[in-house]
Each structure stands twice: as C-alpha cells, then as structure tokens.
Amino acid sequence: QVQLVESGGGLVQPGESLRLSCAASGSIVSINTMAWYRQAPGKQRDMVAAITGDGRSNYADSVKGRFIISRDSVKATVYLQMDNLKPEDTAVYYCYAEIKSTFYARPYWGQGTQVTVSS
C-alpha cells in the first residue's frame, strides 16, 4: 500500500513563506514525476509545480519566481518552498506522484493540506 502524506500548510500573512513537504511510503519500486497541485473553493484543481525523476522542473506562470519545487529521492519526499505568498495562493495543496510499486507506475494523491494567505 502506497501513501503520500503532506505537511506544512497553515495560515500566513501576505509576503510570508511556507514550505510544504510530501513523503511517499509503502512498497515503492521507483518514483517518476512528483508534483504539487492546488484547488481553491469553486475552482478546478490546477498544477502548481512538477519535477521529474531526473530533476527537471516546471511551474505555473502564477508562481514562477516565488515557488521552488525540489525532491529528495532517498527520502522519497517532494518539497514546495513558497515565498512572497499572496492571498490568491490560498487553496488546498495536493501532492501527486507517479509511483511504480509492482509492474507499472500509477498516479497517487495525498490528502491535501490547507494554505491560507490573509492579513
């Protein structure tokens, strides 16, 4: 059984920073792409940042220059450093990973962590 467990969300003021973490556990053979998505109330879930197994990353235009995604392959963990947070960054943030646990890779999602940016 593979699980993704997120941590690091919370309430911050505009301009402040947060760091999200997501650790994969269970019977894991390999992990391909890891990513962060977010979903604000009444809106669809959108990709925020993604990082491949060989370290290539890409970002949504709205977070470029403010967010950095990284991963620790030994710990099977992906991070999202979020700086200069804005009220429009308020959302539930979900971790995503393509994980091979048996014969093929499949997508997994975390349970989500709330990020609220408000003065």
Image (cartoon, rainbow, N blue to C red):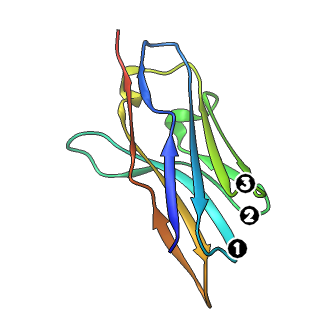
Q: Amino acid at mark 1?
A: Ser
Res 30 label: 1
Residue 25 relative to residue 12: left or right: right
Q: Amino acid at mark 3?
A: Lys
The C terminus appears in which quarter of the rendering?
top left
In depth, the one of 66 and 106 nearer the eye is 106
Q: Residue placed at 61% from the left, 58% from the top?
A: 34
Please tell me in which quadrant of the rendered image residue 105 appears. Answer: bottom right
Q: Residues within 10 Å of mark 1 (few under 14, many from 20)?
A: some
Are the two marked residues, 1 and 2, in contact with CB atoms closer than 8 angstroms?
Answer: yes
Q: Residue placed at 50% from the left, 71% from the top?
A: 107
Residue 99 relative to residue 11: left or right: right
Which residue in the protein does label 3 denote? 75
Please tell me in which quadrant of the rendered image residue 59 appears. Answer: top right
Q: Amino acid at mark 2?
A: Gly
Mark nearer the N terminus (1 vs 2): 1
Q: Residue placed at 63% from the left, 64% from the top?
A: 33
Mark 2 and mark 3: Cα distance apart in space: 13 Å
In depth, the one of 96 and 87 nearer the eye is 96
Q: Residue placed at 49% from the left, 35% from the top?
A: 62
Secondary structure state at the residue bearing disc 3: loop
Above or below: residue 103 compared with residue 90: below
Above or below: residue 26 compared with residue 86: below
In the rendered image, the residue lying farthest to the top is: 119
Mark 3 and mark 1: Cα distance apart in space: 12 Å
Q: Tell which tag, 3 or 1, sits nearer the viewer.
A: 3
